[in-house]
């Protein structure tokens, strides 16, 4: 199965930076407990590998791995609806497995 990465951009449809300025870290903190089976990371100190904050071209973004939906479809719906409810654009990218 091909999994995708979704990028929530921290610029509203009106072109202004989304506030509060730590929105990406807050959203990722809420999602920190969603981890793959066997992941030993402590959600109090690390983000989920499925929902991570990043900075792209000086814009705060959140990268969502769509495998989150396999773990809990409601969790994926939550982050996607967060973006929609706050008028934040979502871009989609594919991830390719390198051939060795």
Image (spheres, rainbow, N blue to C red):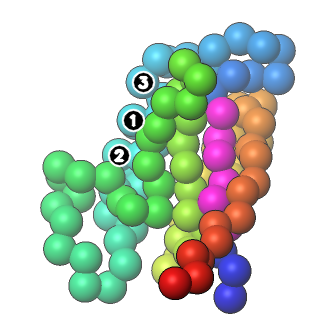
Q: Which mark is residue 22?
A: 3
> Which residue is labeled 2 in the image?
29
- Marks 2 and 3 in Cβ contact (< 8 Å): no
Q: Quadrant of residue 16?
A: top right
**SS assignment at label 2:** helix
Q: Which residues are magenta?
A: 4-9
The residue indicated by pointer 1 is 25
Pointer 1 and pointer 2: residues touching (CB < 8 Å)?
yes
Secondary structure mostly seen in magenta is strand
In front: 41, or 97?
A: 97
Q: Is residue 35 visible?
A: yes
- Look at the image and say whether residue 8 sits in the magenta stretch: yes
Q: Residue placed at 55% from the left, 49% from the top?
A: 63
Q: Residue at x 17, y 74 (%)?
A: 40
Residue 69 versus residue 7 in the image, above or below: below
State if disc 1 and disc 3 touch (CB < 8 Å): yes
As measured in the structure, the alpha-carbon distance from the residue carrying label 2 to the one carrying label 3 is 11 Å
């Amino acid at each position: 199965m091909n999994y995708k990465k979704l990028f929530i951009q921290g610029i509203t449809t009106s072109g202004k930076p989304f506030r509060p300025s730590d929105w990406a870290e807050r959203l990722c903190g809420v999602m920190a407990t969603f981890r793959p089976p066997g992941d030993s990371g402590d959600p109090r100190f690390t983000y989920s590998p499925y929902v991570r904050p990043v900075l792209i071209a000086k814009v705060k973004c959140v990268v969502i791995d769509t495998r989150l939906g396999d773990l809990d479809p409601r969790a994926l719906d939550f982050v996607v609806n967060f973006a929609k409810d706050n008028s934040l654009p979502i871009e989609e990218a594919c991830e390719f497995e390198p051939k060795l």
